[in-house]
Image: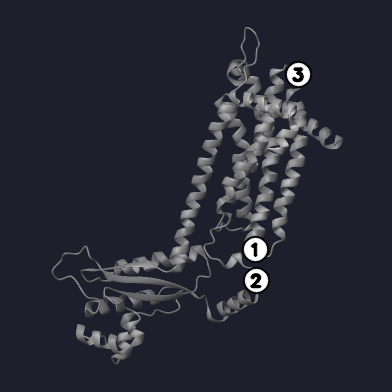
């Protein structure tokens, strides 16, 4: 591939002449993409995972349009077992509970995006001429005689549910705001002693799961980079060289996050593991370039940077093209989230390749210029007196395996 080789050699020449300028340009672009990553949103719903042309999804969209969202939040009102006050409520049929639920239900009903509120107090008033019964016995009788009311309390009479149909359509910001408002309503409503209330329901659960996954995304990326750094330190023999080799992957993850933010691709339960996957796959490119560069430096090559970029870059181009083709095939699926995953993996591998060839060589050139004369014995374990290169344990194992493969290829294939 003469055209690719010539292009890569010209790029390497520019990188040797203007490494700082290239790094400044990349830094500005990275800052722009980092700002875009702040625009990235979470998608806790499953709506985005299904194609819109399915009949069941189409009918769901029609129902949401005509009647509003079918999401339902819940508030669980229950006895507080930790309360030891002698005046504490010990039965959910206590009129004080009904009064509290009534006040709380009215407060919640006044919030934006709340379509309706169904609670024990409303059911009791419907069965008692618009009034809340004044005794436990009256409330108990109504519960026993009405299946509708009985469905709002548990069998032990220790808890009751407030059902809140809401119109949020998977919008995390609306969900968060509504949860804050309902939480404030719970805190502001005069609660009887021995009673506690908490928010639950599928929207809240999914939102909480997505918050956990978002936190796990950051943690998995951090942990994966730490392990990769340790392995690189062992292989490349110096922490600075290991850190430099890790920079392209870090920038690639930022660029992908920025792309998601600018294109409006939300972070879902499927795409949340994207970062760690890109770290694992993208680090290969940096290792190849770094190892080849210092291998040529060790041999005394005058154009080590150019030769390493050309030789490794050409092979990486073919590797990246085939990998992108494989991930790109995912974009032909019918599921939107699968299409997004295919696009993000494809663009992520492309970013890792570009950053490796554009950013890593200037960093290696700077390290070679200012650090190599001091750390060459640490990087390659070169014995200064004899110039004998000391093989690492990994290299010895690979050398032994290669000899066996050369001597007995048929046996290796059979095994």
**Left of 3 or right of it: where is 83?**
left
In which quadrant is the N terminus drawn? top right
Of mark 1 and mark 2, the one earlier in the sequence is 2
Mark 3 closeness class: few <14, some 14–19, many ≥20 residues within 10 Å: few
Identity of the residue drawn at 71% across and 34% down = 412
The quarter of the displayed image where residue 358 is located: top right
**Which quarter of the figure has residue 303?**
top right
**Rendered position, 213 above or below 242:** below
| Residue where numbered disc 1 is placed | 336
Residue 407 on image: x %, y %: 74, 26
| Identity of the residue drawn at 67% across and 41% down | 352
Q: Are marks 1 and 2 in contact (CB under 8 Å)?
A: yes
What residue sits 37% from the left and 67% below the top? 199
Decide which of tag 2 and tag 3 comes sooner along the chain.
2
Label located before the other in sequence (3 or 1): 3
Taking the image as shown, residue 94 lies to the left or right of residue 30, namely left
Crowding near pointer 1: few (<14 within 10 Å), some, many (20+)?
Answer: some
What is the total number of numbered labels drawn onto the structure image? Answer: 3
Q: Residue furthest bottom?
A: 129
Pick out the residue farthest to the right: 2
Q: Mark 2 points at which residue?
A: 52
Residue linked to disc 3: 302
């Amino acid at each position: 591939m003469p055209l690719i080789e010539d292009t890569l050699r010209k790029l390497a020449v520019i990188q040797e002449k203007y490494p700082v300028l290239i790094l400044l340009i990349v830094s500005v672009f990275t800052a722009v993409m980092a700002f875009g990553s702040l625009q990235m949103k979470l998608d806790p719903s499953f709506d985005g995972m299904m194609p819109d042309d399915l009949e069941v999804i189409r009918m769901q969209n029609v129902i949401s349009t005509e009647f509003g969202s079918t999401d339902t939040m819940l508030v669980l009102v229950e006895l507080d077992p930790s309360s030891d006050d002698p005046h504490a409520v010990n039965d959910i049929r206590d009129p004080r509970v009904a009064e509290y639920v009534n006040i709380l239900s009215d407060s919640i009903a006044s919030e934006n995006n709340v379509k309706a509120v169904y609670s024990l107090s409303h059911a009791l008033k419907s069965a008692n001429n618009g009034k809340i019964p004044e005794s436990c016995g009256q409330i108990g009788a109504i519960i026993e005689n009405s299946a509708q009311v009985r469905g709002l309390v548990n069998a032990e009479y220790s808890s009751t549910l407030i059902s809140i149909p809401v119109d949020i359509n998977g919008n995390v910001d609306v969900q968060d705001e509504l949860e804050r408002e309902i939480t404030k309503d719970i805190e502001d409503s005069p609660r009887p002693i021995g009673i506690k209330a908490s928010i639950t329901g599928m929207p809240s659960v999914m939102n909480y799961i997505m918050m956990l996954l978002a936190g796990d995304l950051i943690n998995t990326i951090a942990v994966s980079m730490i392990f990769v750094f340790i392995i690189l330190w062992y292989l490349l023999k110096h922490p600075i060289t290991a850190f430099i080799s890790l920079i392209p992957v870090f920038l690639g993850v930022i660029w992908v996050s920025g792309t998601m933010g600018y294109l409006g691709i939300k972070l879902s339960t499927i795409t949340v593991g994207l970062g760690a996957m890109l770290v694992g796959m993208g680090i290969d490119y940096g290792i190849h370039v770094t190892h080849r560069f210092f291998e040529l430096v060790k041999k005394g090559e005058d154009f080590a940077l150019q030769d390493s970029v050309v030789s490794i870059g050409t092979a990486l181009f073919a590797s990246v093209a085939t990998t992108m083709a494989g991930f790109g095939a995912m974009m032909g699926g019918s599921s939107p989230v699968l299409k997004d995953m295919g696009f993000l993996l494809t663009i992520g591998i492309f970013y890792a390749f570009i950053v490796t060839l554009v950013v890593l060589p200037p960093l290696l050139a700077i390290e070679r210029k200012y650090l190599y004369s001091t750390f060459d014995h640490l990087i390659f374990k070169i014995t200064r007196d004899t110039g004998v290169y000391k093989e690492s344990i990994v290299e010895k194992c690979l050398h032994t395996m290669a000899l066996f493969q050369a001597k007995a290829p048929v046996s290796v294939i059979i095994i």
